[in-house]
Amino acid sequence: MSAHKNPRQFPANTREALANAPLQKTLERIKLGFQLFRMAAMQELPELESLRTALAAAKDRALAHLPHYLEQFEKNVIANGGQVHWARSASEAIAIVSRIAREAGVKRIVKSKSMLTEEIGLNAPLIRDGFEVVETDLGEYIIQLRDEPPSHIIAPAFHLSRADVTQSFRAAHTHLDPKRDIDDRKSLVREARQVLREKFLAADLGITGANALIAETGTVCLVTNEGNADLSMTHPRVHVAIAGIEKILPAMDDLALQLRLLGRSASGQRMTVYTSLRSGPRKAGDADGPEAFHVVLVDNGRSQLMRAETREVLRCIRCAACLNHCPVYASVGGHAYGVTYPGPIGAAFQPAISGIAATHHLPSASSFCGRCESVCPAKIPLTRIMRHWRERGFGKGVAETPNAIALKLFAFAARHPRLFRAAMKLARPFWHLPFGPMAKWRKHRNAPPAPAGSFVARVQQRRKP
Ligand code: SF4
């Protein structure tokens, strides 16, 4: 399956994904790898519900006073010896990072995983500007070699098998002795580590994302399982942290709350392996750290979203639990969505930043089973937000013509009960025909047998004395 997809082609993308046998096999790992681990980790937390409520409240508090906390964060970063840059859009953010790198005489950049840099498309313009840019999270490194976008927000190479990775390393690492066995997991990791160590040591600039920005101390918090963020922000002489403005938290106590839920929600870990806090450049007497520390705060549609009915989506801590529990995501994988953030969070967030015209299929890619919001640590009402975007898409007339006509007909019939009942009666024999619109609907779904009578008829029957 080629990776760079268009969200406007979502129905075709899903058909392609469903017919892709190797992809279907890798997607089976979702249940074992994520769902069961999360469930086990959450069973250890009897206070889970109160923690989720507290996290939602802390994020809401931060967002309600966003300008205040962002300015407090900026003041404290400057007091710590760092610099803060404000970017209204993706292009402004790219220009800022490129300028910082140019002015610092940088040639080689190492990057730690950051979904925001995927959102703004940072790598390609930096490479065009003449910088070498290397992703250092193992999954990100693999997909960079393959020129693919991430298919999952915490496991970017989730769609690939071990054989795919072996093949990518053999193609890209031309120094590899063809006789050397790298087919098992350990050998692949060892090979990646050797190559990436050289990159870390040679890098002038490290770019990281941020899991949270702490206003009261001017601190950037990052969590990883590989330690690559620590190497990216400690060894190079310049560190640039880039984050969406919604990552702000008022205080360290709020961060402690977020961290208790993040690892468990994401991968079923009590804590991710590395939790790193950076509050400024290296000070006299420090053993290590960068000479310069920059934070780029990116809006890219978020302040507009603050004023919208869907603002709760900004509570997201990017744990991916909603993807891992979504039956649609588990059936088609991340690339089919054709956007940076796949799954329920993408269906709720992406229309706000990419426009409903381009993304109107995504909020419809939900059965509204509600599993996503039942596992969301920030209690984001994902189904309500998706419904909002469905309505917005329908209202703007961007829904596909057959769907729009079908919905209009349904709405008309639903307002006229007699007509509705007659239509249902007429439609019942067509339910199981091997052709026609219902046959198309049933192609990837198990349809129960049509009941003998309609729901209304059965209720009326029961009410009969
Ligand atoms: S919407 Fe909730 S579950 Fe999904 S990634 Fe964000 S915080 Fe996690």
Image: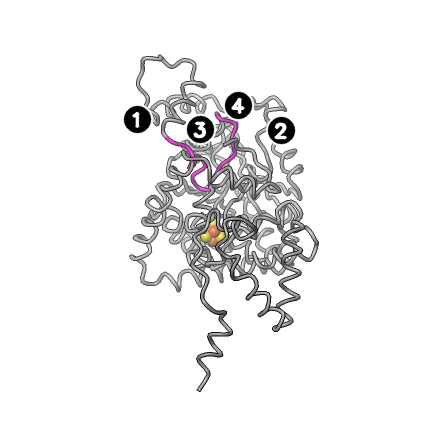
Is 159 contained in the magenta span? yes
Question: Percent from the top left, x then y, of residue 210?
Answer: 50, 43
In this picture, which residue range is highlighted in magenta? Answer: 146-161
Q: CA distance from mark 1 to mark 2?
A: 35 Å
User: Does 330 appear above or below 383?
Assistant: above
Label at residue 108: 4
The amino acid type of the residue labelled 2 equals: Pro
The amino acid type of the residue labelled 3 equals: Ile
The residue indicated by pointer 2 is 125
The residue indicated by pointer 3 is 142
User: Does 283 appear above or below 308?
Assistant: above
The amino acid type of the residue labelled 1 equals: Asp
The amino acid type of the residue labelled 4 equals: Arg
Question: Callout 3: helix, strand or loop?
Answer: helix
Q: Going 44% across and 43% down the picture, which residue do you hit?
A: 277
| Residues packed near mark 3 inside 10 Å, few (<14), some (14 to 19) or many (20 plus) | many
Whichever of labels 4 and 1 marks the residue nearer the N terminus, that label is 4
Question: Callout 2: helix, strand or loop?
Answer: helix
Whichever of labels 1 and 2 marks the residue nearer the N terminus, that label is 2
Q: CA distance from mark 3 to mark 2?
A: 20 Å
Q: Going 30% across and 57% down the picture, which residue do you hit?
A: 43
The residue indicated by pointer 1 is 184
- Circles 4, 1 touching at the beta carbon (< 8 Å): no
Which quadrant of the rendered structure holds the C terminus? Answer: bottom left
